Image (cartoon, helix red, strand yellow):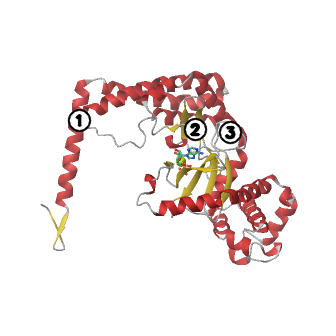
Amino acid sequence: MEKRLEVRQAQVAAFASERIEHYADRRRVFAALSEIALSGCGAEEIVPDEFSSGAVSQWQYVDYLRHVGGRRHEKIRGRVELLENYSVFAGAVDDLRAALDKYEDPEQHLAFLGKGSNSRVYAVDVGNTLYAIRIPKPERTDPGVIDGHIAAALLGRWAPHLEQIVAASYEQGVTVAEMVPGVDMGHISVDEIQCVQGRQIEDLIDTLQDTQERGINIDPKPSNVLYDLLEGYGIVDYQAPDDFAFQGVGETVASIASALGRAGLYGKQLDYEKRETYQYVQAVQLANLVVVQRYQAAARERLHSDDYEVAAGKIESILATIRAALQECGDPQAVETRIDRTKKLRESRMTSERRLVIRDGNVRTI
Ligand SMILES: Nc1ncnc2c1ncn2[C@@H]1O[C@H](COP(=O)(O)OP(=O)(O)O)[C@@H](O)[C@H]1O
Ligand SMILES: [Mg+2]
């Protein structure tokens, strides 16, 4: 891509992200980002009328560029840098995509690291360093979503324990990040949870406070929180606040407590008709109880008391949920009752499915 195009994309994206208030208007500009950047028109026409809904005028765009000082503006300069860096990774991404095409299930590829609702992430070696390449699912290539990651990356730059995006492409919908070591809360083992150190929990609270100061919103799904024995907790997939309100530190700390409380359980298809499942849940919840209790103590010590107030009630209810699960798993009678209930539920579901069989165009019960 010509440099000029990267600068144009960065300018229009920064303008849209910083100045276009309404989601629908912003979406329209992002959807047409490449077209706008590619159109050989002068700066005044960079947001052509067809993409403008009156709420977004070319005049506003030009005024914005003048006001912020064009490329000197950090939000523009930062975007240009990430877009330019992409040329280093473009070949590797093409190779990866070609390799993935050969798989019926792209998650079988050896480099597969994990997935969320929007993308799959792969570890790829470029220049003897491993990077995490985020490939969007086919229906999730909205440049507005990519810009959400980019904007957040600019806010989170150099912050320890936060994912660092080093390159991105709006057209490809791809972001390239440094590897965050560790395993996510959905896949962590009981042994690993038991290894968590107090210092690492304190660092996590500090990281969350740091995100507040930087104006970053965290998506607190357990899959976005990684743990490494040596490096402690790392956060991926964070966002710049968009239409949704900016969370306070108390809410963020509480929501991450909930992720820690579901460690080893999130996303797992557990069979509640089997007794071993209850032994597993007991072991994992016992480990989680210890972590969440230490986390609560660290939050009490490190947060401003107003913020802690907000978090405390929610953390208490997370602890209560864990304790209730432990009580159930530790009580053989309760386990038998639950196994029975689960069985009956499955059977009744099967019968109701059977009742809904369509035969010869008619709904029949069988
Ligand atoms: N920089 C990274 N380093 C290591 N693993 C990562 C990194 N980014 C993402 N992952 C893994 O990939 C998974 C999905 O990535 P994520 O960015 O959360 O995708 P989505 O936006 O679809 O939720 C994560 O749960 C994590 O396991
Ligand atoms: Mg995610």
The residue that appears at 58% across and 28% down in the rendered structure is: 230
Q: Which residue is mark 1?
A: 339
N-terminal of the two: label 2 or label 1? Answer: 2
Percent x, y of residue 135: 55, 57
Q: Amino acid at mark 2?
A: Pro
Q: Going by the image, does 340 lie left or right of 86?
A: left
- Quadrant of residue 363 within the rendered picture: bottom left
Percent x, y of residue 271: 29, 40
Q: Amino acid at mark 1?
A: Ile
Q: Secondary structure beneath disc 1?
A: helix
**Pointer 3 with pointer 1, Cβ within 8 A:** no
Q: Going by the image, does 194 lie left or right of 351?
A: right
Q: CA distance from mark 3 to mark 2?
A: 23 Å
- Quadrant of residue 339 within the rendered picture: top left
Q: Amino acid at mark 3?
A: Gln
Quarter of the C terminus within the rendering: bottom left
Q: Residues within 10 Å of mark 3 (few under 14, many from 20)?
A: some
Q: Which residue is mark 2?
A: 181
The residue that appears at 54% across and 61% down in the rendered structure is: 97
- Quadrant of residue 159 within the rendered picture: top right
Can residue 121 be seen from the camera position used here?
Answer: yes
Q: Secondary structure beneath disc 3?
A: helix
Q: Is mark 2 within 8 Å of ligand 1?
A: yes
Q: Secondary structure beneath disc 2?
A: loop
